């Protein structure tokens, strides 16, 4: 047996007819679990791959889980993009899909271990900017390795021994929500967190801090070249229609202990 034509079409359509690893066009639908290993001819076992990615990863059973995560992550992204389509004309595409130039080597077993020490003199902005530059530099010099980030904090303790508001927010929101998509694991003094999806390798070059979503602050962000605003208290992003590689982390008031650690 093999995939039915309907199943192959659905799998390709969910991927925008692109490879779920490198995003190149012209794909074939392959079994995540091979037929020889009793893999089913179902949509859940289908992975749209280009010939190159299939040759590199398709036959490696150690990559099945990661391939499935990458496929699910890509299908989810395409579904979200489709929901945002407002222009359905045939002359203007609603969005452009680019090939992922970082895809090669994305499923390597080797890891990049990153370590950053926050000094007692560092404030929130300094620590956050340094960490983003560290992760971005890792992607630049050893691309697509699974990144494990370890963060130590010197000082920044209150009289009772708990962290001050800056370092509490840095760990509880900035690292565990904003940074985690760009790494595989983060280990910090308060807790550790693991990325349950495929690691994103398009790492921002830096961060730009806003005081609030106001017309004045938005104009300031646009002037600085920002197109993605990440609101800490909501854990959500606001997109500005202007291309850039800089993301924004906006600090907003929050209550301690209001978020479950899982």
Image: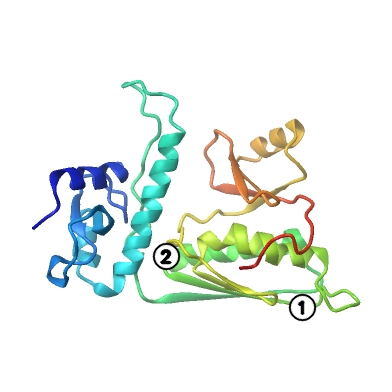
Residue 43 visible: yes
* Residue nearest the viewer, comparing 30 with 247: 30
Image vertical order of residue 257 relative to residue 155, above or below = above
Residue 28, image x and y in percent? 18, 51
* Residue nearest the viewer, comparing 73 with 104: 73
Disc 2, SS: loop
Residue drawn at (69%, 77%) of the image: 189
Of the 4 image quadrants, the one containing the C terminus is bottom right
Q: Which residue is mark 2?
A: 143
Residue drawn at (75%, 64%) of the image: 257
Q: Which residue is mark 1?
A: 154
- Label placed on residue 181: none
Residue 42, image x and y in percent? 22, 55
Residue 81, image x and y in percent? 43, 39
Question: How crowded is the residue under tag 1: few (<14 C-alpha within 10 Å), some, or many (20+)?
Answer: few
Disc 1, SS: loop
Residue 136 visible: no
Residue 223 lies in quadrant: top right
* Residue nearest the viewer, comparing 8 with 175: 8
Q: Earlier in the sequence, mark 2 or mark 1?
A: 2
Of the 4 image quadrants, the one containing the N terminus is bottom left
Q: Is residue 104 left or right of residue 252?
A: left
Residues under labels 2 and 1: Cα distance? Answer: 30 Å
Residue 147, image x and y in percent? 49, 70
Residue drawn at (18%, 64%) of the image: 55
- The answer to whether marks 2 and 1 mark residues whose Cβ atoms lie closer than 8 Å is no
* Residue nearest the viewer, comparing 131 with 212: 212
């Amino acid at each position: 047996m093999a995939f039915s034509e309907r199943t192959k079409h659905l799998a390709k359509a969910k991927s925008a007819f692109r490879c779920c690893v490198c995003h190149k066009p012209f794909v074939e639908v392959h079994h995540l679990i091979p037929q020889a290993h009793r893999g089913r001819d179902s949509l859940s076992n289908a992975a749209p791959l280009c010939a190159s990615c299939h040759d590199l990863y398709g036959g490696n059973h150690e990559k099945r889980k990661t391939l499935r995560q990458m496929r699910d992550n890509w299908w989810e992204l395409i579904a979200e993009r489709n929901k945002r389509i407002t222009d359905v004309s045939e002359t203007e595409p609603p969005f452009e899909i680019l090939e992922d130039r970082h895809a090669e080597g994305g499923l390597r077993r080797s890891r990049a271990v990153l370590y950053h020490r926050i000094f007692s003199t560092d404030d929130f902005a300094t620590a956050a900017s340094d960490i983003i530059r560290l992760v971005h530099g890792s992607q630049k010099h050893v691309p697509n390795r699974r990144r494990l980030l370890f963060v130590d904090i010197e000082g920044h303790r209150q009289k009772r021994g708990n962290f001050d508001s800056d370092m509490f927010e840095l760990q509880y929101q900035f690292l565990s929500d904003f940074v985690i998509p760009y790494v595989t694991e983060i280990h910090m003094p308060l807790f550790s967190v693991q990325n349950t999806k495929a690691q994103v390798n398009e790492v921002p070059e830096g961060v730009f801090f806003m005081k609030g979503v106001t017309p004045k602050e938005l104009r300031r962000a646009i002037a600085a070249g920002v197109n993605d605003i990440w609101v800490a208290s909501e854990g959500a992003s606001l997109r500005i229609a202007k291309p850039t590689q800089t993301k924004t982390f906006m600090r907003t008031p929050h209550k301690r202990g209001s978020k479950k650690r899982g």
